[in-house]
Amino acid sequence: MKQSVHNSSVVPGYRFVIYAMTVLMCVIGYGDRAVLAAGMPLIGQEFGLSTTQVGWVLSSFLWSYFILNLPAALLLDRFGPRVVGMFSVVLWSVAMILGALSGTLVQFLIARVLLGAGEAATFSLGNKVVDAWAPLRERSVMMTAFTCGIQIGLAAGAAVGAWLIMQYGWRVAFIVLGVVGCLWAAAWFVAYPAHDRSSTLAGGVSGGMGLSLRPLLRSRSFWCVVGAQCTGNYANFLMMTWVPTYLVSTLHMDLLHSGANTAICYLAAACLSMAGSRAGEWVLARSGNGIGARRRVVAFFLLLVMVVAALPLCTTALEIMGVLSLAMGAIIAALGTNMALLAELLVERHYLGSVTGFMLTFSNGIGILAPVATGYLVAATGNFHAVFYVTACIVLAGALTAWLGPRQMFHAAAGRDRAGNEVQQGAGS
């Protein structure tokens, strides 16, 4: 079993400062996304957008995010979390401010694409930091805590963003969040050690072997992890882009109440996902099956996401918010556990940032489809029923993929396992 590479040359317990700042980075990034979703009714009116056009605008940051996942991860492995984290957040925060200054739809879309470029390294950075700093017993929980930043950020962005939009307009809300991101970037550059273990590994201490995609492409285990991540990400991107609009159209709420109720769902989901992650770690500790047990935990959480199929049957705000909260919490727990599984399966862990970026290239490519497909389905049917049925089928496929594999560790280095064969040790039943 691979051991933790957490830093021992800094103040004991300092890893919790790094954890907190890494989670805060995720909170800020997803808060920026939530402000767009919260302000979309007003932005759509200002730019004269149709329902299908709204779907394209909601997905616009994903275009560059998807394309740049792997390049950003390669830069992360080369320069380390300290430098890449600072520049990434500065870039997307400046993009928020530029979006606020946009006078045309084209300018606004360019700003959103720039934001996606800045956020491309987010999850690779989070996975790399957790792997470098967390002892093995904390890894799955801390990865879920990091992904909880999604829900906390969406909650803050929905509630605070909606209030700012109602009081001062969506442009001011964008500027405020852009300034917050710049402040975080400065604090991160000061707080993160310049020569931590992950930076040393990033500098090329790999026994003379370079990253190679060939063994990844030929690994059944890797593709099973990718498949689970793709389906979870589809549901995740649906929730983070369309929930405020869904509440407005279904429950006839105004913008402020929609933002508040969306925030409640996100916060409840964050609590549920952390509780689920802790329960999953308890199962892992008792089972002793290693990889075999962790993949079953991923499958279980994805099966819980299928509760979204019950949304068309819900008629009250309490019922809808309860189902949304459970589904969102299960999504985050599944994604966090799946990311921890990726780190556990990878032999050359100094390439974890790059391998995570490669996986996210596929999963975010699928995620792009969620807001766009939702726009077309709602325009064609006049409601969200088909959206939730399709999502339930997609996550069912992901649960089956996680359950049936992965069972073996894999390589990511040139000069090792050139035939693409997987390592046999460490396999779970």
Image: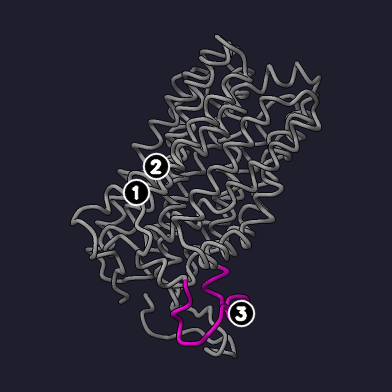
In percent of the image, x 37 and y 43: which residue is there?
273
Residue that badge 3 annotates: 218
Q: Which quadrant of the rendered structure holds the C terminus?
A: bottom left
Name above or below for residue 362 compared with residue 185: below
Coordinates of residue 55 in the picture (x, y in percent): 73, 33
User: Does residue 162 belong to the magenta stretch?
Assistant: no
Per the model, the C-alpha gap separating discs 2 and 1 is: 6 Å
User: Does residue 220 belong to the magenta stretch?
Assistant: yes
In percent of the image, x 46 and y 43: which residue is there?
185
In the rendered view, does 297 fall on the left or right side of 36?
A: left
Coordinates of residue 218 in the picture (x, y in percent): 61, 79
Q: Which quadrant of the rendered structure holds the N terminus?
A: bottom left
Q: Amino acid at mark 3?
A: Arg
Find residue 13 and name its label. Answer: none
Name the quadrant containing residue 41.
top right
Q: Mark 3 packing: few (<14 Cα in 10 Å), some, or many (20+)?
A: some
Find residue 187 and name its label. Answer: 2
Residue that badge 1 annotates: 191
Q: Amino acid at mark 2?
A: Ala
* Residue 182 seen in this snapshot: yes
Q: Amino acid at mark 1?
A: Ala
- Are the residues at dot 2 and dot 1 in contact (C-beta closer than 8 Å)? yes
The magenta-colored residue range is 203-223
